[in-house]
Image (cartoon, rainbow, N blue to C red):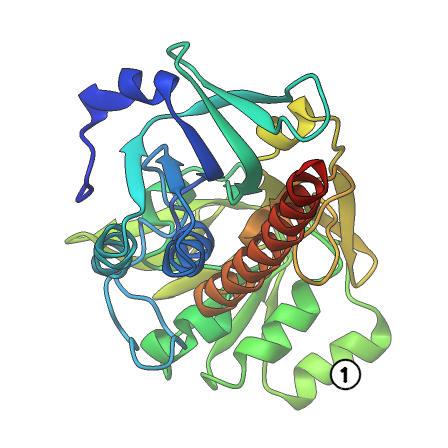
Amino acid sequence: MTSRTDVSDMDMKQRQRYDVVVVGGGAAGLSGALTLARARRSVLVIDAGEPRNAPASQVHNYLGRESTPPGELLEIGRGEVTGYGGEIVRGRVASAERLPGEGRGFRVVTEDGTAVEARRLLVTTGLVDELPPVPGLAERWGREVLHCPYCHGREVADRPIGVLSVGPLAVHQALMWRQWSDDVTLFRHTGPEPTDEEYEQLAARGVAVVDGEVEGLEVEDDRMTGVRLAGGRVVPREALVIQARFTARSAVLESLGLVPVPQEMGGEVIGTYVPTDPVGATEVPGVWAAGNVTRLTEQVIGAAAAGLMAGAAINGDLIAEDTRNAVEARRRG
């Protein structure tokens, strides 16, 4: 990781206090850190080094950075943050707590017991994609096993695409992916049977429906070539769309008393997230969150925008506190 501080220097942070500690160094965290560093705030980013999009080869729909590899985008971001004086270290935050006394801020503790203090916190820990329990999905995740047509649709356009049904959103997925290919097959698997209206919609769009559970994937020369059903039949497919469950990495926020809530879409619970206001403020004063931990379906550019908004809001909050403190000091003479 490119940074002004080395991992081995983490113990030095015990003797320092920051305006803001950012937990998580993805697009949201780095964007928030960049905003704050440019505002001349002291900022420390603690990053576990586990970006959600690591399996993907490219980032898409990011204006000005279309098709950039995820690792390269983060490396650019880290350089920008440190270029303005922000600090980045590798570590995993175990918990955070409010320090006793008004205006004292927070203590952040990493898994190795290192502690740092901050006036404000920005938590951008993202989410975990929980895949359906079908052998082979995890190994092809982000390659031919996909979930978002806006992230990957263009890359598999005009190829044979399968959609794995595990819930009521499957028909919606199939009809959506039909925009990118005229060869789409819906595998019923464990999902509910489509309604008569849905069957009519699928037929009208030329989407085939295959009954039976999916047992695994066929792979040749490190490329997916088909979907294997429980009876042994193989349906040739070059990509498989799934509905992952999105679970917020909310442990740090939970340690502060914030509780994740279910996210519903189309009558189905697709995961959990931690609620915030439009600029990322949580119910705990002094704590903000941005990115996928609070918006499950956010793409990379949206996460970066959310980090910017949270960073600006945090700086505004600090300005207000600095002003109050200055007024009090002036009155004391």
> Seen in the image, is 257 located left or right of residue 13?
right
Farthest front residue? Answer: 333
Q: Position of residue 216 (x, y in %)?
A: 43, 44
Residue visible at 37% across and 17% down in the picture: 14
Where does label 1 land, which residue? 200
Residue 239 showing in the rendered view? yes
On screen, 61 above or below 254?
A: below
Return the x and y of residue 187 as percentages of the image width and height: 58, 60
Q: Residues within 10 Å of mark 1 (few under 14, many from 20)?
A: few
Of 58 and 47, the residue lying toward us:
47
> Is any part of residue 130 visible from this angle?
no
| Quarter of the figure with the C terminus | top right
Image quarter for residue 154? bottom left
The residue positioned farthest toward the bottom in the image shown:
204
Q: Position of residue 255 (x, y in %)?
A: 66, 22
**Quadrant of the image occupied by residue 47:** top left
Who is closer to the viewer here, 183 or 139?
139
Can you say whether 190 is above or below 161 in the image? above
Q: Secondary structure at mark 1?
A: helix
Q: Compared with residue 314, is residue 117 higher up or lower down, i.e. above or below?
A: above
Quarter of the figure that contains the N terminus: top left
Q: At which x and y percent is residue 279?
A: 66, 61
Which residue lies at the image location 56% right of the left edge and 38% below the top edge? 121
* Observer-nearest of 223 and 292: 292
Q: Is residue 290 left or right of residue 26?
A: right
Q: Amino acid at mark 1?
A: Glu
> Residue placed at 62% from the left, 69% from the top?
173
Residue at 35% over, 59% down: 144
